[in-house]
């Protein structure tokens, strides 16, 4: 987050002032020596992002599948800060089925889901100052766990998943909460992680609704101000 000088128009006049702006980095991810992806994301929590990316892109199944992770900043040659993450994978990749039980069912009350969404909003400290980030977190249905803000909605979700993967705790948190629009990609991330409930303050896309229905994932949108829309698998949401 940086302060920049701006010209502001308000109350019918222009004025000069400073405003806080969210920063972004260009993250160059190398896997076994090959450039795999260039990710535009916030300049923080690189380890969680790398593990979350590798997991959601089906490159690894657990944190133990990464033999080594080395990261470094490049010399600044432009306005964008370049960051390099070099990953060496283990020779043998673990089985996903051993890490995420298929039968981890959950139900949650409307009151609790609204409370969790409100708690997540309170943790959006960078957004409150810049208006330029999304936030995502996992939950066990009782409390918030692994909350991360990012300029990218995908990276925010991947950081949350990566953090729980590093703590060998992904199986304990079957609820994904976010402030961002839910699209097909995020639903595939949720399906990959065995998440049962995806809930957002924002709207889903049609493809997200279709993926949720096919995967039997409860999809909740417009979760705010005492209301919500349930687009798929509503039985997990209980009035109260």
Image (cartoon, helix red, strand yellow):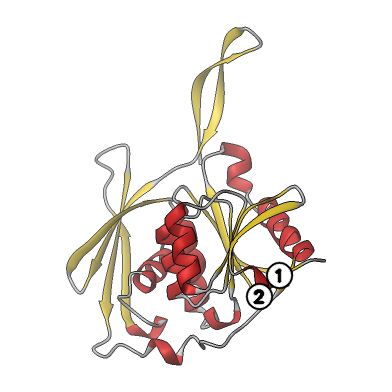
Instruction: Say whether residue 216 is left or right of residue 223.
Output: left
Query: Could you say which is closer to the camera, residue 145 or residue 101?
Result: 101
Comparing 94 with 4, the one in front is 94
Residue 219, quarter of the rendered image: bottom right
Q: Is residue 52 visible?
A: yes
Q: Residue 51: give x, y in percent of width and height.
A: 39, 71
Question: Is 139 in front, or is 88?
Answer: 139
Query: Counting other residues with Cα less than 10 Å from the Cα at mark 2, is it few (<14), some (14-19), or many (20 or more)?
Result: some
Near mark 1 (Cα within 10 A), the count class, few <14, some 14-19 or many ≥20, is some
State yes or no: discs 1 and 2 in contact (Cβ < 8 Å): yes
User: What residue is at 72 percent from the left and 54 percent from the top?
Assistant: 118
Residue 91, by quadrant, is bottom left
For numbered disc 1, what is the local secondary structure? loop
* Residue at far right of view: 240
Residue drawn 57% across and 12% down?
A: 15
**How far from the left and from the top, in percent, is residue 180?**
53, 51
| Residue drawn where x is 49% and y is 60% of the image | 209
Mark 2 lies on residue? 140
| x and y, in percent, of residue 61 in the image | 37, 82
- Residue ranking furthest to the left: 34
**Which residue is identified by label 1?**
143
Q: Secondary structure at mark 2?
A: loop
How many numbered discs, if any?
Answer: 2
126 to 220, vertically: above or below: above
Q: Is residue 55 above or below residue 92?
A: above
The residue lying toward the viewer, choosing from 139 and 41, is 139
Above or below 232: residue 74: above
* Vertical position of residue 210 compared to residue 194: above or below: above
Residue 1 picture location, percent across and down:
51, 41
Quadrant location of the C terminus in the rendered image:
bottom right
**Distance from Cα at disc 1 to Cα at disc 2:** 6 Å
């Amino acid at each position: 987050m940086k302060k920049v000088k701006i010209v502001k128009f308000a109350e019918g006049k222009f004025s000069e002032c400073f405003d806080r702006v969210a920063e972004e980095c260009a993250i160059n991810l190398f896997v076994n020596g090959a450039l795999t992806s260039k990710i535009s994301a916030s300049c923080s929590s690189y380890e969680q992002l790398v593990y979350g990316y590798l997991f959601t892109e089906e490159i690894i199944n657990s944190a133990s599948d990464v033999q080594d992770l080395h990261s470094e900043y490049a010399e600044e040659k432009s306005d964008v800060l370049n960051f390099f993450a070099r990953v060496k994978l283990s020779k043998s990749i673990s089985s996903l089925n051993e890490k995420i039980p298929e039968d981890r069912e959950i139900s949650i009350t409307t009151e609790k889901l609204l409370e969790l969404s409100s708690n997540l909003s309170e943790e959006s400290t960078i957004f409150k100052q810049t208006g330029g980030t999304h936030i995502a977190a996992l939950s066990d249905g009782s409390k918030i766990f692994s909350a991360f803000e990012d300029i990218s909605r995908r990276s925010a979700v991947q950081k949350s998943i990566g953090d729980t993967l590093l703590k060998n705790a992904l199986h304990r948190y079957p609820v994904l909460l976010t402030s961002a629009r839910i699209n097909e990609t995020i639903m595939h991330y949720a399906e990959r992680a065995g998440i049962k409930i995806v809930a957002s303050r924002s709207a889903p896309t049609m493809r997200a609704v279709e993926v949720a229905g096919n995967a039997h994932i409860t999809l909740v949108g417009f979760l705010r101000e005492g209301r919500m829309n349930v687009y798929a698998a509503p039985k997990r949401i209980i009035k109260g």
